[in-house]
Image (cartoon, rainbow, N blue to C red):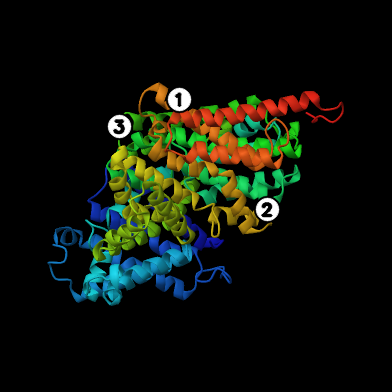
Amino acid sequence: MRDLQGPLRALCWSWAAAAAAVHLYFGGFGFPEPIQMRGFHLLVFTPLLFLLYPARRSAPTPRPTLLDWAWAAASAVPHAWVMWNWMAVADRMEYVDPFTPTMMALGILCIVTLLEAIRRAVEPGLAVMVALSLAYMQWGHLLPGVLNARPFTPEEIVEAAWLVPTAGGVYGPLTGIVATIIAVFVLFGSFMQASGTGRLFSNFGSAVAGRYAGGPAKVAVVTSGLFGTMSGSSVSNVITTGSMTIPLMIRTGYRPSSAGGIESAASVGGLLMPPVMGAAAFVMAEITNIPYGQIIVAAALGAMLYYFAILAAVHFEAKRMGLAPMPLKDIPAWREVLADAHLVLPIILLVWLMMERWSGNFAAFCATIAMVAVSLLRARTRMGPREVFNALAQAGFTMAPLAVTIAGAGIVVSALTATGMVVAFGGIIKQLSGGSLPLLLTLLALTVLVLGMGVPTTPAYIIAAAIGVPQVLELGRAIGVEPLQAHLFVFYFAVLADATPPVAAAAFAAAAIAKTSPLITAAQASRYGIAGFTVGFAFIYDPAIMLRGDIGAILLAVAIQLAALTLITSGFAGYLLAPLGVPLRAAMLATGMVAAFVHSVTDLTRLLIGVSVLAAVVAIQLAGARTAPAGQGEKR
């Protein structure tokens, strides 16, 4: 993003702040008609991207060029037309009423400017995917077999991508979710950061974990998880917390790739952590028609298990390497932590309102206003007019790329639906699985991870859910798989794609800070984030981790995951109570995988297998410690 100066900086910051403020107002007092709101959302944010992001990242210009201004003006025209003619757009019969030459020209202009905005501000891979989806509508009838689609006229293609607000496209339901619910949550996260909640999280993480072996890494895990509740972006988490934690981990003895991998895995997990789980979770609520409060309850235990596994992996590796805790001078006193403790009150209010079934946008609006009010209780957190303005502007800068991202994903979904490719691709996966649910889930997980190479988490989730969830529900009917289980499965792998090689945005950002290999960092991130894979499958086979069933079933499901993750993380690190030899490491890894993934045996059997091997290794190491000659024992 350009570092603008002078009047132009004031213009863009005021623009972003005003757009965000209007969204906040609508969140509390009601939204206009859907097509009006979606048009307004894209009208205020799309042109801003051409002023903030240069055409070429390799040679950015410090100020927008005349061409950038032309792009910005052109991108505003289609959305302004839709807002002005919203009644006609809302009342027209899709594919029946005439699609006039004016509409055709405006639709093409909208698509072209949207693709360029995505290329500049989000990810070129997503722009390519959107373009390919449109190309498939144009030439899909020339392809053989299951890839064959019916012919579409150019008018049908542009109408489907642009002006079919009930089914998909630029003004479809996905854009509606972002313009209403997600926008207000982005505002809440921005106000959390402006109030000093980030300092609270960082100090809390240091106070809780800094005194233990591998303290800096554990601080990174705790802090990144807490930051994830307000940022909704794994890359933002890495940049925000990693700039502090990665150098500190390296200074205390971690390899740069390990430090980057720990930060990446922890930052990615922020999107799994309630109460704010990123944009994809709100999309999930809309697609499944399940209240968001139910989703965060179902996801809570899984997120805790994810962070347990990272902390366990960090602990075992720190003990094996003999790494020291953080220096005492760098650990804040608890009075320093408690000085900001009042800032958790708006978060508690947010969770309470959502559990009471208030709408997400109104809950986030109330929590945002409460954050400003609560910040006034202490001088160190007090938000004055300047801080409020900056929080609004930062929220606007976050919303702008998200707006075009979701609009692009809407075009892809519209194309896949219109051509029948959703059914065809889902049929391909189902055919390859041969009717086996485990194989289908594996293929779907790989599909989501591949999608995540080129597109952000939310569109990857949206596309994969459209393709794979119906197949999972069909094959999973025998074991009672429900929609929320299938969607959480897809969601987990869409999130993990940001940290898994060969292309992993969060890991690459961490590698840049650590000054190490991006691919090795991504591989390390996958190792530390192994719980994402086990928990993803557990949503299907162990639904008790979604807090369903009696307390006994829930405790059994959690115990299985804890045993499996302890075995896997200890085996990877090569340490439990003492260093592990190769045979014991192999045995622990194999047993952990069996406990986590072999669902053909009973849950109790899986638990007994995991606990028995874990207890046996502990006994072996304790016996070895007692018989070791003096002076050869481990230094503790």
Q: Which mark is residue 360?
A: none
Counting residues from the start of the chain, the first of labels 2 and 3 encountered is 3
Q: Position of residue 94 (x, y in %)?
A: 16, 63
Q: Which residue is more in the foreground, 33 or 585?
A: 585
Mark 3 near mark 1, Cβ–Cβ under 8 Å? no
Above or below, 406 relative to 241: below
Above or below, 334 relative to 302: above
Res 261 visible:
yes
Q: Amino acid at mark 3?
A: Arg
SS type, badge 3? loop
Task: Give the label, 3 or 1, closer to the camera.
Answer: 1
Mark 2 near mark 3, Cβ–Cβ under 8 Å? no
From the image, which quarter does the C terminus lie in?
A: top right
Name the residue that disc number 1 marks. Answer: 555
Task: Give the label, 1 or 2, closer to the camera.
Answer: 1
Name the residue that disc number 2 marks. Answer: 514
SS type, badge 1? helix
Counting residues from the start of the chain, the first of labels 1 and 2 encountered is 2
Q: Amino acid at mark 1?
A: Leu
Query: Label 3: few (<14), some or many (≥20) within 10 Å?
Result: some
At a point 36% along the width and 49% down the height, the residue shown is: 436
Counting residues from the start of the chain, the first of labels 3 and 1 encountered is 3
Q: Which residue is more in the foreground, 186 or 564?
A: 564
Q: Position of residue 68 (x, y in %)?
A: 45, 71
In the image: residue 530, left or right of residue 415: right
Above or below, 155 relative to 193: below
Query: Label 1: few (<14), some or many (≥20) within 10 Å?
Result: some
Q: Amino acid at mark 2?
A: Ala
Name the residue that disc number 3 marks. Answer: 357
In the image: residue 402, left or right of residue 263: left
Q: Position of residue 265 (x, y in %)?
A: 56, 46
Q: Position of residue 630 (x, y in %)?
A: 87, 26
